[in-house]
Amino acid sequence: MKETRNIRLDLSYDGTDFQGWQIQNSGRTVQGEIEKALKALHGVDVPLYGSGRTDSGVHASGQVANFHSHLSSIPEERYREAVNSHLPRDIRIMKSRVVPDKFHSRYDARVRVYKYYLLHSDAGMAHLRNYCYLTRDKFDIQQLNRLAAPIVGVHDFTTFAAARDENESKVRDIFSASFYPEGNFIVFKVTGNAFLWRMIRSLTGTIINLAVAGENEDKMKEILSSCDRSQAGPTAPARGLFLHRVLYESESDIY
């Protein structure tokens, strides 16, 4: 039996034309395209494990995945070029390296960082339509941050879980949640140990809805504690959301 190496990939993708990360019965997926590339390299099926599942239309600038390779001829840093040569242009491997055999990109992840991009535009910006939520509403960042503050900490996020979320526990630990300007955008940056299906988009849509209605943080606290999905606002579009970074035990806690 050939000796294998555990290879970590740091990657980015444009989620516009994907049905999400995870392989499905039909539709184009990020995991599916990378596993095709790995099969082209190895000559056999090679399972790929991702740090998390992004939904249809969601992007990533810092996804992490790993696989076990029996190839001894490729230096660890060259897997990047080798895999990229078999991938479509809307997926790019940015870095490849050997990690301990027991490393698992999903189960070993300690911090996940997401960013949601909002852009005020009366007419719309055609070239940005797939990468942010274009809105005619103008927001006060301080108000947005007051509305976001109640979600920090350990909470039951049932209110913000999609109806088909299969997680038995809806409790999650949110380390930080803040809005800030980045160029012409307003960015909602959320960090936590893990997230429920569509949770960030639901939180974003609810905060926007409350801001437009002129509500305060007490209303957000009430909605969160209700554990009632019907109390949440509309779910924000997938196109504004990016998986920004995933951190592991040995990595910096500055995110």
Image: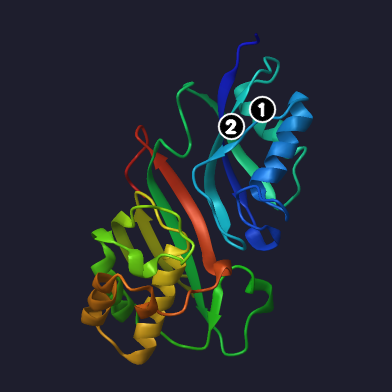
Question: Is residue 41 or residue 44 the one in the foreground?
Answer: 44
Circle 1 SS class: helix
**Who comes first in sequence, dot 1 or dot 2?**
1
Q: Is residue 126 left or right of residue 162?
A: right
Q: Amino acid at mark 2?
A: Ser
Q: Which of the image's four quarters has the N terminus? A: top right
Is the residue 66 above or below the residue 171 in the image?
above
Q: Is residue 134 left or right of residue 141?
A: right
Residue at 64% over, 44% down: 31
Residue 137 lies, in percent from the top left, at 47, 88
Q: Are marks 1 and 2 in contact (CB under 8 Å)?
A: yes
At label 2, counting other C-alpha atoms closer than 10 Å, the crowd grade (few under 14, some 14-19, many 20 or more) is: many
Residue at 75% over, 26% down: 44
Q: Amino acid at mark 1?
A: Arg
Question: Is residue 169 or residue 50 the one in the foreground?
Answer: 169
Q: Residue furthest top?
A: 1
Q: Is residue 224 left or right of residue 205?
A: left
Q: Is residue 183 visible?
A: no
Residue 202 lies, in percent from the top left, at 43, 71
The residue tagged 1 is 78
Residue 231 lies, in percent from the top left, at 35, 79
The residue tagged 2 is 96
Q: Quadrant of residue 250?
A: top left
Circle 2 SS class: strand
Residue at 52% over, 59% down: 242
Q: Is residue 229 left or right of residue 234?
A: left
Residue 45 is labelled as: none
